[in-house]
Image (spheres, rainbow, N blue to C red):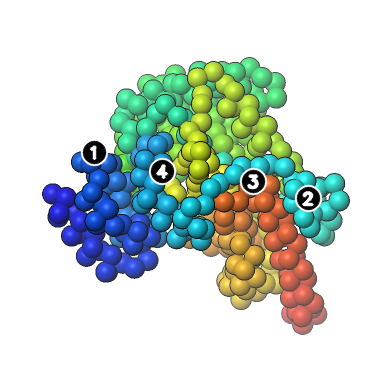
Amino acid sequence: MDMGFTARIEELKRQWPGNIALQCFDGQEYAALPQAARQRLAKCLASGVENPDSQMGCYACQPSDYDALKPFFSRVLARYHKVPEHARHVNDWDLSHIDGLPAGGLLDLAALGLPPLSMRVRAGRNLKDFPLPGAMDRTMRVQLEQRMMAAFEGLIADPAYGGRYHSLTPGNPCFIDERAYDELVAAHIMFKNMDQDRYLLAAGIAADWPHGRGCYVSADRAFIIWVGEEDHLRIMCMQRGTVLNAVFDRLKSALERVGALPGLQFAVSEDYGFVTSCPTNLGTGMRASVHMPLPNLTRDGTDAKARAIAGPLGLSVRGIGGEHTPIGADGTVDISPSARFCITEAEIIAALYQGIARLKSEEDKAAANHPKSEEN
């Protein structure tokens, strides 16, 4: 069986050079592992073997996988994140350590001449005492949801949060019907049906849908926690405004608040930071983004010019509905720093601010080259 697995990987490696996990697989190293470790690594590779067109091609299945299977994952992390194989991650939210920011560290987009924008910052977290979603069965998923519901009672009773929990699990006292679910999805509050994602299905992450899935929403609908998606928790803050610090600081305090709730302990690797199912999110688990209108840079109907500017700055440009979605009719795009690992939380939000400043400057230049009078 192991010989056949190794042979299949080697064949796929030749056919799919862009699949990082396959390219980082070492057959001799695999053969030298104990049987249990071989099975463990094969489980992590399942999605990339079934879907060799994957870029990453693997998911961790246990909180300890990154450390227990370090030779493999160190190569994966180095190749994707473009860091040395021995790189260690450090978490730090302190903006005072960052050069080139406005005096006092206030990241106010209004000072750049921008109107209020949709701002969102999120972080993936997993609980230490559960398998990661790819290795959970239905009973575990429901148990995790129940653990979180008990914890959410503390948030709901807190005037700073309030709100309610919405469950997708049949029979749950907080169960919502399909109509309510669709409304939350349309409002970009709840995550979409995972049963339609072939990568998550092959990884085991989407199994047992919709059991154990749900979403806590604060009273002001600006603080959200997804339960049972790609990670146990996706914790996010959103706001329309101009001061990036507002969502950044609220997320920091919210993570501290959630992490202090009874029965919750986040999974952390001493070398790699906060543990996430996908190696792309490891370290900070954090994504910070804004929806920014760039009507002149997207005048041709594409985000090609915006990508050309943003890419060298370490920023990703996406459609307003996320990856593989179109830009807004007014040229609005989603801007976010690409890095998660071997970068601090403070560096992520600073990179977003500095990238927005550069894009605003280039947008103004493009506008000057296309005065409105030429369009009339």
Amino acid found under the numbered disc labelled 1: Ala
Residue carrying label 2:
107
Q: Which image quadrant for residue 163?
A: top right
Q: How far apart are the alpha carbons under marks 4 and 3?
A: 21 Å
Q: How far apart are the alpha carbons under marks 4 and 1?
A: 15 Å
Mark 3 / mark 2, whichever is N-terminal: 2
- Residue 140 position, x and y percent, is 35, 26
Q: How far apart are the alpha carbons under marks 4 and 2?
A: 35 Å
- Residue 235 position, x and y percent, is 56, 36
Camera-nearest label, 3 or 2: 3
Q: How far apart are the alpha carbons under marks 1 and 2?
A: 49 Å
Amino acid found under the numbered disc labelled 2: Leu
Amino acid found under the numbered disc labelled 3: Glu
74 on left or right of 96: left
Mark 4 / mark 3, whichever is N-terminal: 4
Mark 4 / mark 1, whichever is N-terminal: 1
146 on left or right of 339: left
Q: Residue at x 31, y 67 (%)?
A: 16
110 on left or right of 15: right
Compared to residue 14, the image places residue 196 above or below, namely above
Q: Residue at x 73, y 70 (%)?
A: 363
The answer to whether residue 298 of the structure is visible from this angle is no
Residue carrying label 4:
66
Q: How far apart are the alpha carbons under marks 1 and 3?
A: 36 Å
Amino acid found under the numbered disc labelled 4: Tyr
Residue carrying label 3:
345
Front in this rendered view, residue 156 or 279:
279
- Residue 150 position, x and y percent, is 50, 18
* SS category of the residue bearing label 3: helix
Residue carrying label 1:
36
Q: From the image, which quarter does the C terminus lie in?
A: bottom right
